[in-house]
Image (spheres, helix red, strand yellow):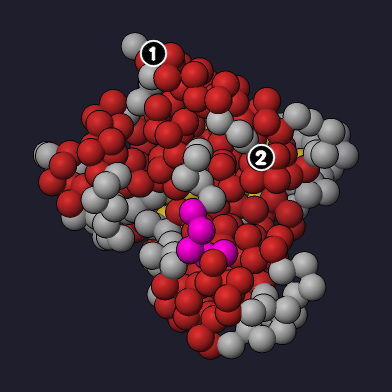
Amino acid sequence: MICKSYLVEENLNILENKLSLFYGENAGLILDFKKKIIEANKTKQIFRYNQDELLSNTNKLYNEINNISLFGEKKVILIENANEKILPIVEEIYSTISDNLIYIFSGRLEKKSKLRIFFEEKKSVRIVPCYQDTDITLKKIIQKKLKNYRNLTPNFINLIVENCGNDRTTIQNEIEKIQNFFIDQTLNKEDLTKLINYREDDDFLPIRDKAILGNKSETNKLLNTTIIEDDKIIFYLNTINQRFLRLQEVLEQNTGSVEGTINLLKPPIFWKDKPIFILQARMWDLEKIRFVLKKNYDIELKIKSSSNINRKTILKKHLVDICNVVSAA
């Protein structure tokens, strides 16, 4: 059964059934749903699996479901980077889930997708399409997040939306910048205009791009010479995440030509950034991209949940690890 994403955003309990699938091109919205689910179930046992992990051991999920908790608690299971290959496992376990909750996250699924059809046609499961945000949905996000800020006019909201390229993750980054800058919660046009047009990541982009290209010597050199600010670590992680999501989009849409596929992207890749983006797209495959995206997400959660860690060291190691992933055979 299909559930509208905006209704699920307002009330996660709409997904009263025990098995739900989130799919679509809006990676930022899917990430938001993951965070909401984890937050709503923080007192329960939460297990996270990558599809490949379950495919390599097809009994793993079935055994986990049937392994009763010592405390009789419900288990919450998240399955990430899913596609058609997960369907046989879903068909096997969906009637034996008991009181556990299983959430599956996928990218785009065509109308003829058997996985999508399975969830759309069965009343005992839920499917949530995550389409790209419109100006209206993005404006609602801004209004909700900044509702206590004085001088939040329609013009200010439009200014923020125009700067984000209809990307939810970028919007959230802009909102975070605004919240950190306007401590007194009073907006003014001059400072807001400077803030949202100021590219905080300019100094970080060369490190990110060299790491994604697997250039170890240049990455190490830049890590030693670039100032990485502690209060911008989450922003840096989001910058890495956005690049890998775009690379994933290219490989999933593969038209036979990397450059041709990139030319079809919306919003388009900035012309100055296109040459290095093309090189990166030719060096990565979907499996490696999904691995890095999961690791990036795990690091963000770790940083946000603990204040007693060295955030800069974690970020630097992550960049080195990315170098090693793309360089691996």
Identify the residue under disc 2.
229
The C terminus lies in which quarter of the figure? Answer: top left
Q: Earlier in the sequence, mark 2 or mark 1?
A: 2
Q: Where is residue 312 shown, x and y percent of the image?
A: 68, 31
Residue depicted at x 54% and y 81%: 156
Residue 23 found in image quarter:
bottom left
Q: Where is residue 265 shown, x and y percent of the image?
A: 25, 55
Q: Is residue 203 visible?
A: yes
Most common SS among magenta residues: helix
Q: Give the range drawn in magenta.
A: 195-199
Identify the residue under disc 1.
328
Q: What residue type is labelled 1?
A: Ala
Q: What label sits on residue 75 in the rendered view?
A: none
Q: Is mark 2 on a helix, strand or loop?
A: loop
Q: Which residue lies furthest to the right in this view?
A: 71
In this rendering, position of residue 154 left or right of residue 2: right
Q: Where is residue 68 shown, x and y percent of the image?
A: 76, 35
CA distance separating discs 2 and 1: 30 Å
Residue depicted at x 64% and y 45%: 232
In this rendering, position of residue 84 left or right of residue 290: left
Observer-nearest residue: 116 or 222? Answer: 222
Q: Is residue 17 visible?
A: no
Observer-nearest residue: 138 or 109? Answer: 138
